[in-house]
Every structure is written in C-alpha cells, then in structure tokens.
Amino acid sequence: MISQFGSNTALLLIDVQVGVDVLEHWGGPTGRRNNPDAETVMADLLTAFRAAGRTVAFTRHDSREAASPLKFSLDTGAQKPGFDPMAGEIVVEKDVNSGFVGTSLELQLRRAGIDRLVVVGFFTNMCVETTVRMAGNLGFDTYLVPDACATTNRVGPDGVDHDPELVHQMTVANLHGEFCTAISPTVAHGLLAADDTMAERVQGNE
C-alpha cells in the first residue's frame, strides 16, 4: 500500500525550461526526445497539487557550461509556458545536476514539513535521476512519475546513438526499487485523495 499524499508531500518539478528542447545540444545532430506528452502530464499534476493545497517546489538550472541553452542569460533559460512558480512556492536555482547540491532545497523542504517527494521534469537520466538518487539517500519517501519526465538520445563514447525511450526506460529501471517508487499519473492523482491499497511502495536503502 501507498498512503495518501498529505501535507507532508511536495511535487518537485525539475528544470522545466525552454532549453530542454534544443535537442541538437543534448543529442547531437540526430537530437530527439521521447515522451512528447510529458509537459501535459506535468501540468495536470501541477494543477492537482495546487488545488489540493500541497507544497510545490521547482528547480531551475543555470548551467556552468558556456554552450548550454539552460542559462538564465538566454531566452532558452526561461520556464516553459504554464510552469512559472506561484507566490509562496519553493524555487531553487542550481548549476549542477542535483537539486540538492549548492541549494537550499533540502532546508526549505524540511522547514515546510516535507518528507515525501513526487518528482517530475527533465531530463530523466540527468537532473531528474541525480535529484531522485539524492532524495532517496537523504531519507525522503520519493516517488517518480516517468510519464511526467522526458529525455533525449545519448551518443556513447563508441559512437552508438542510444534511443531516448531506451535511455528513459533504463533510468527508471535503475531508480525504481532502490532510490524511489515509480508510479503512474493515475496513481499519483489518486493518492492526493486517498490511500492506494493496490500500489506497492518499493524504495530501498531503508
């Protein structure tokens, strides 16, 4: 069973910024992403968490890398439409993959009484993965909604171009059962209202 997402639960949106769609930067000349519906699923969850009066938190990425499109000095560093934080919501700015490194994210969450996180955003195998791993290690009861995440293809050192859906699925497989519990959007929405007796929490390291 997974217990209801109460007042100790926050929705954490990772780097929902325009620059994630500069696909040639992330995936090279063949740059492409998976899950074109990710933003719709994220937006639905954001609306539901706000309507339920739950805490909402955002990370925003301002890259150290000169060529990155995720820089606040560029138009591509802006939030995607519909994902601007509201007054009183937690917002942290980061320049590395983890939302917890060099930020006040953990402190702000703890002060808000948050010990459960529902994580969505970009990219599944980069900042989402790093943040989820740290959240689990920091003792947060962590849930990942893969349908509300997306990533791009990745070209390995051997030149092999790995499909974005494969990268996404492998990342989720690595995280689920060790650092978090992966759940569907339907389960996430339902947990805002009641316990889910059919779902199973499988986070490890406990």
Image (cartoon, rainbow, N blue to C red):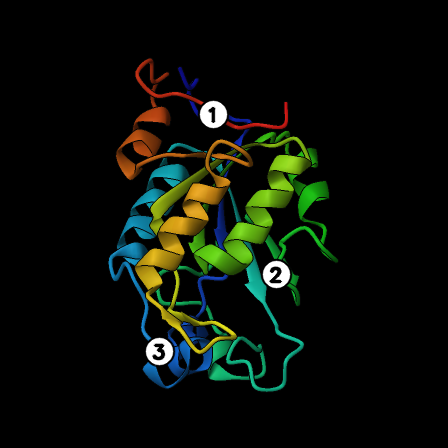
- SS at badge 3: loop
Name the spot of residue 62 as percent of width and height, x first.
61, 72
Going from N to C along the chain, the mark reached first, 1 or 2, is 2
Alpha carbon distance from label 3 to label 1: 34 Å
Question: Could you tell me which quadrant the N terminus lies in?
Answer: top left
Going from N to C along the chain, the mark reached first, 3 or 1, is 3
Nearest to the observer: residue 75 or residue 201:
201
**Mark 1 or mark 2: which is in front?**
1
Answer whether residue 20 is visible to the viewer in this image: yes
Q: In the image, what residue occupies the spot 35% across and 33% down?
A: 188
Tally the numbered discs.
3
**Residue at image mark 1:** 202
Q: Amino acid at mark 3?
A: Gly
Q: In the image, what residue occupies the spot 52% across and 26% down?
A: 7
Answer whether residue 88 is visible to the viewer in this image: no
**Residue at image mark 2:** 97
**Residue at image mark 3:** 31
Q: Amino acid at mark 1?
A: Val
Q: Amino acid at mark 2?
A: Asn
Alpha carbon distance from label 3 to label 2: 20 Å
- SS at badge 1: loop
Which of the 4 image quadrants contains residue 50?
A: top left
Name the spot of residue 169 as percent of width and height, x first.
36, 50
Q: Residues within 10 Å of mark 2 (few under 14, many from 20)?
A: some
- SS at badge 2: loop
In this rendering, would 103 be left or right of 61?
right
